[in-house]
Image: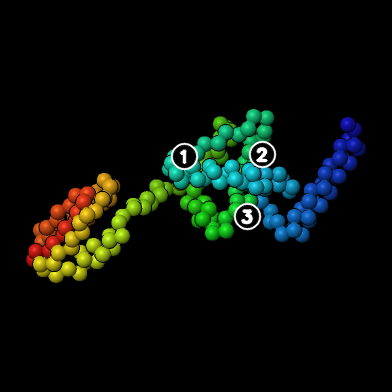
């Protein structure tokens, strides 16, 4: 290719990029990382990315993504950026993933051609407790002397029992507790 042909090619490509950028602006598409035609800004790749995020939440383990063989690493990074943007724009009406992504770090390692997706810090883990747990909390803060809180006929799992035992361990000598998987009795004696 001669210099003249090369210059003509670059001019035409520049014109196409400008036309795509104008088209994207006309259709309300904001600029995101990657090419102006956004080949990965589609539902199927975004659903794959959503599955990776769901797996991260389920396992709490860092997710590692290897760049595809034969692709430039920048293409790999663009794919992740475009999938994320499509997910937020079209597949997240409740803004769950928008909130989740505020707590997630996406780190690209060009040398190893890997991308790591992990929580920025240890996420808070909620415990499942029985419906009466707020009543017990209220009792512990408002109970007078010789007051009793009692729930029997329960079927607590070991995690729930451990939760209530941890609460009981913080009580002082004015309290008496009896707990197992079938009952919780808490009394304030003084």
User: Measuring 66% from the left and 51% from the top, which residue is drawn there?
Assistant: 32
**Is 127 situated above or below 64?**
below
In x, y percent, where is residue 132? 27, 61
Could you say which quadrant of the image residue 5 lies in? top right
Report how far apart the C-alphas of labels 3 and 2 lie in the structure.
22 Å
User: Measuring 63% from the left and 38% from the top, which residue is drawn there?
Assistant: 76
Q: For numbered disc 2, what is the local secondary structure?
A: helix
Instruction: State yes or no: discs 3 and 1 in contact (Cβ < 8 Å).
Output: no
Could you say which quadrant of the image residue 49 lies in? top right
Provide the residue designation for mark 3: 90
Q: For numbered disc 1, what is the local secondary structure?
A: loop
Provide the residue designation for mark 2: 75
> Which circle, 3 or 2, is nearer the viewer?
3
Provide the residue designation for mark 1: 62
In x, y percent, where is residue 80? 61, 43
Report how far apart the C-alphas of labels 3 and 1 lie in the structure.
25 Å
Report how far apart the C-alphas of labels 2 and 1 lie in the structure.
22 Å
Regarding residue 81, the answer to whether it shows in the image is no
């Amino acid at each position: 290719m001669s210099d003249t042909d090369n210059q003509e090619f670059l001019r035409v490509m520049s014109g196409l990029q400008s036309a795509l950028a104008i088209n994207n602006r006309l259709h309300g598409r904001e600029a995101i990382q990657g090419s102006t035609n956004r080949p990965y800004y589609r539902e199927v790749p975004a659903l794959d990315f959503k599955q990776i995020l769901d797996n991260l939440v389920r396992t709490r383990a860092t997710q590692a993504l290897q760049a595809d063989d034969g692709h430039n690493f920048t293409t790999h990074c663009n794919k992740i950026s475009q999938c994320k943007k499509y997910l937020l724009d079209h597949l997240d009406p409740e803004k769950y993933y928008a909130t989740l992504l505020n707590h997630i770090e996406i780190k690209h390692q060009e040398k190893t051609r890997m991308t790591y997706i992990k929580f920025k810090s240890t996420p808070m883990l909620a415990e499942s407790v029985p419906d009466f747990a707020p009543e017990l909390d209220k009792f512990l803060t408002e109970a007078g002397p010789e007051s009793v809180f009692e729930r029997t006929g329960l079927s607590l799992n070991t995690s729930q029992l451990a939760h209530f035992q941890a609460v009981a361990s913080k009580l002082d000598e004015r309290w008496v507790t009896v707990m197992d998987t079938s009952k919780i009795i808490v009394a304030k004696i003084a």
